[in-house]
């Protein structure tokens, strides 16, 4: 057997360089590059190996942000490629835990390579080592276990091959993918070993299109044939399986309108007559009205989160039944549905064939088309609000939508922006809508924009970020400048947390603690606004900044940013008290059952009324 003598770190990097994915005859590089921040736990191992092996390396500024960028990269590539992230032991490692949770919740593959304590224990306790009295084999990296789909710790070099093969299997499994963590003791990283040469040969991981089981397909088709008011709910699985054309063909042939989850938005163009837009708590009136009367709901690639179901209040028909198409059996079985465990594209193509000659009643299709048209008129009015003295957020979204012109990628994650975009953004190309709402992680926006742009360098990426999320994590602007990666960052400044401010008011908490203000005479944070200058901060990080005050100035600046060649921030202040149009969706956020505040008591009454709409969906 031919062997090659390398350190564990060198073997790891050489192995990663040889991994490929394949689907439908097209191959991709599985691990495109490695983000890294070096410390004593990885500088002599993974760091030296990245230098020697000449593997693409990106210098991160924050470990959490590195993982966000890798997750966004994977999402933009429909999970066929991703990135690795290496950190030192200690805070560098635990900083990645939030990113791991985001990736796993959103079913996005990322590879995390945190340094770890000495396997030999000769110098215990080393710097940043957790001394856990219940067992000396526990380190801070054990916090990755519940938020990783695969976790291993390589205590000896010869354990590396099995760890790597297990990791690659999960990264390329459509149903099981998420964060994958291989913890690497720092002494093992630098230790040499004689590795079998075949470990470093090109290896292709075939990503399957699991076909539907014939009996399950027959059950689903029979249920749909009996429907009078069917509704399709398109989730992220439609995009990841590249099933947008199959969705359109199925909807058109069967005459079934389509509503979309956050992850599934852009699976159908907004101007399609059968597209109802967003569903649920942040949904459109069109989608929510039809969901309220639907007798059969066909969920494709959705995991049915509380926002999608409006906390299980949006489906109002007492006899509503579900057909759930999903590669993950656990999601396919939700809501006691007819489970079709299959790839979205394969299942949609099979359902189209199985339902040949059948169509939903023409009256149902016509009603859906009218509702969709009415909602588009509502969107247009929101785009043209012309609120003064400060513009409404819906106006900002309208201008960005106009400038993007149906292409490029709009990206955000937390606050009021995801809900407003879900209702108001007019989608064009598949994948042009990138909102992280599985974890809704503040700080994802700029890092995610970097990852999306690295994955789609020919697309304009419009990062929409509020001041709250910007202050959480703007560090990867430096990485974008360093790498010559162009982002268009729209910073919407509203002096606090707009989304939670609105939510606080709705539950009777009077926007307490949601504005950026000095402490006032009352002892609360209700004084003057803080003199924070986010535009100046971005400029100090090397970004070109365009300050605007009116919506017309904003449009002009955004057009200028689109033509620029460097990362550019367009800054505008908005009025957070102006809501987007209501889609009549509800979200279950418990209100204090007893209170001395009239606002809270009133909110509790409204909450108890809305709770009556909830159903178990059994």
Image: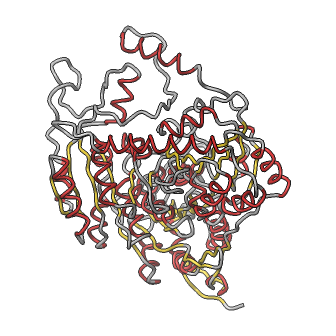
Q: Residue at x 21, y 62 (%)?
A: 543
The x, y position of residue 325, in whole percent, is 70, 52
227 up-or-down from 591: above or below: below
Question: Quadrant where the N terminus lies?
Answer: bottom right
View extreme (right): residue? 215
170 up-or-down from 496: above or below: below
Residue 414 position by quadrant: top left
The x, y position of residue 408, in whole percent, is 38, 64
The x, y position of residue 573, in whole percent, is 20, 43
Residue 297 position by quadrant: top right
Along the line of sight, which residue is nearer the eye, 254 or 108?
254
Along the line of sight, which residue is nearer the eye, 403 or 184?
403
In the image, taking residue 516 as reference, residue 430 lies left or right, namely right
The x, y position of residue 483, in whole percent, is 31, 73
Question: Quadrant where the C terminus lies?
Answer: top right
In the image, taking residue 268 as reference, residue 497 lies left or right, namely left
View extreme (top): residue? 596
Along the line of sight, which residue is nearer the eye, 220 or 124?
220
Number of marks: 0
In this figure, which colouring scheme has been used for the structure? Answer: secondary structure
In the image, taking residue 356 as reference, residue 277 lies left or right, namely left
Along the line of sight, which residue is nearer the eye, 290 or 74?
290
Q: Residue at x 81, y 47 (%)?
A: 222
139 up-or-down from 476: above or below: above
Q: Residue at x 40, y 45 (%)?
A: 424
């Amino acid at each position: 057997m031919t062997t090659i003598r390398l350190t564990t770190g060198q073997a790891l990097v050489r192995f990663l360089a040889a991994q490929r994915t394949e689907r439908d005859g097209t191959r991709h590089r599985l691990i495109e590059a490695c983000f890294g921040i070096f410390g004593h736990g990885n500088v002599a191992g993974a760091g030296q190996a990245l230098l020697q092996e000449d593997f693409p390396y990106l210098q991160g500024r924050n470990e959490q942000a590195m993982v966000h960028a890798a997750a966004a990269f994977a999402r933009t590539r429909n999970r066929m490629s991703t990135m690795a992230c290496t950190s030192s032991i200690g805070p560098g490692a635990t900083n990645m835990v939030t990113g791991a949770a985001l990736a796993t919740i959103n079913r996005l593959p990322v590879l995390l390579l945190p340094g770890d304590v000495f396997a030999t224990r000769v110098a215990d306790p080393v710097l940043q080592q957790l001394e856990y009295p219940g067992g000396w084999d526990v380190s801070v990296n054990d916090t990755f276990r519940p938020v990783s789909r695969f976790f291993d710790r390589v205590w000896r070099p010869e354990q590396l091959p099995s760890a790597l093969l297990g990791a690659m299997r999960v990264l390329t499994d459509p149903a099981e993918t998420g964060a994958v963590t291989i913890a690497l003791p720092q002494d093992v990283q630098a230790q040499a070993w004689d590795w079998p040469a075949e470990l470093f040969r090109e290896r292709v991981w075939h990503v399957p299109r699991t076909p539907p089981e014939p009996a399950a397909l027959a059950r689903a088709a029979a249920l749909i044939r009996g429907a009078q008011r069917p509704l399709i709910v398109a989730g992220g699985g439609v995009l990841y399986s590249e099933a947008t054309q199959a969705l359109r063909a199925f909807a058109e042939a069967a005459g079934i309108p389509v509503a979309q989850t956050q992850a599934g938005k852009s699976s159908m163009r907004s101007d399609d007559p059968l597209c109802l837009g967003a569903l649920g708590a942040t949904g459109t009136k069109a989608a929510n009205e039809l969901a309220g009367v639907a007798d059969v709901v066909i969920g494709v690639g959705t995991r049915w989160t509380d926002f999608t179901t409006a906390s299980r209040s949006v489906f109002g028909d007492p006899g509503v039944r579900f057909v759930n198409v999903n590669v993950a059996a656990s999601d396919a079985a939700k809501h006691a549905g007819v489970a079709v465990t299959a790839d979205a594209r394969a299942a949609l193509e099979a359902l189209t064939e199985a339902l040949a000659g059948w169509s939903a009643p023409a009256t149902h299709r016509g009603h859906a088309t009218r509702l969709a048209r009415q909602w588009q008129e509502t969107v247009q009015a929101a785009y043209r609000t012309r609120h003064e003295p400060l513009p409404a957020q819906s106006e900002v979204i309208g201008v960005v939508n106009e400038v993007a012109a149906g292409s490029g990628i709009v990206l955000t994650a937390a606050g009021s922006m995801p809900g407003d975009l879900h209702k108001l953004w007019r989608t064009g190309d598949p994948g042009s809508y990138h909102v992280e709402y599985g974890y809704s992680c503040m700080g994802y926006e700029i890092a995610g924009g970097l990852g999306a742009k690295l994955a789609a360098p020919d697309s304009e990426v419009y990062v929409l970020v509020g001041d709250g999320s910007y202050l959480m994590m703007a560090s990867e602007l430096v990485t974008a400048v360093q790498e010559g990666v162009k982002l268009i960052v729209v910073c919407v400044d509203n002096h606090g947390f707009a989304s939670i401010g609105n939510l606080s008011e709705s539950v009777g908490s009077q926007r307490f603690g949601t504005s950026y203000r000095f402490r006032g005479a009352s002892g609360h944070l209700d004084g003057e606004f803080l003199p924070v200058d986010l535009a100046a901060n971005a400029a100090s990080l090397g970004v070109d900044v365009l300050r605007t005050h009116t919506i017309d100035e904003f449009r002009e600046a955004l057009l200028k940013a689109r033509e620029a060649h460097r990362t550019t921030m367009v800054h505008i202040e908005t009025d957070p008290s102006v809501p987007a149009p209501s889609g009549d969706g509800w979200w279950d956020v418990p209100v204090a059952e007893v209170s001395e505040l009239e606002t809270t008591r009133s909110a509790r009454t409204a909450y108890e009324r809305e709770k009556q709409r909830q159903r178990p969906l059994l």
